[in-house]
Amino acid sequence: MPKLDDTMPNGVAWVLIVLITGAVISIIAGRGYDAVAKAANWMSPFIVLAFLAAGIVALNRLG
């Protein structure tokens, strides 16, 4: 897990995650507004779950 003072990637996995995420976002954006709207509709349930998971993890770390 990167720390707040890390200025460079600290592993190959992080570099690959960033490259894959960037490629997916670029492909969706390149296809136009309709593709962005479809992707947003498909991803919205997962975003809600991701926020809930992040909140649970943060609460556990806070004690």
Image (spheres, rainbow, N blue to C red):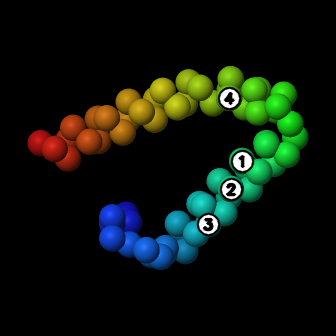
Sequence-earlier tag: 3 or 1: 3
Q: Is residue 11 left or right of residue 24?
A: left
Badge 3 marks a residue whose secondary structure is helix
Marks 3 and 4, how far apart at CA: 23 Å
* Three-letter amino acid code of the residue under disc 3: Leu
Badge 4 marks a residue whose secondary structure is helix
Badge 1 marks a residue whose secondary structure is helix
- Quarter of the image holding residue 41? top right
The C terminus: image quadrant: top left
Q: Residues within 10 Å of mark 4 (few under 14, many from 20)?
A: few
* Three-letter amino acid code of the residue under disc 4: Ala
* Three-letter amino acid code of the residue under disc 1: Ile
Q: Which residue is mark 2?
A: 22
Sequence-earlier tag: 2 or 3: 3
Q: Which residue is mark 4?
A: 40
Q: Residues within 10 Å of mark 1 (few under 14, many from 20)?
A: few
Q: Which mark is residue 16?
A: 3
* Residue 15 x %, y %: 58, 69
Q: Mark 4–mark 1 contact, CB under 8 Å? A: no
- In the image, residue 35 sits, relative to residue 10, either above or below, namely above
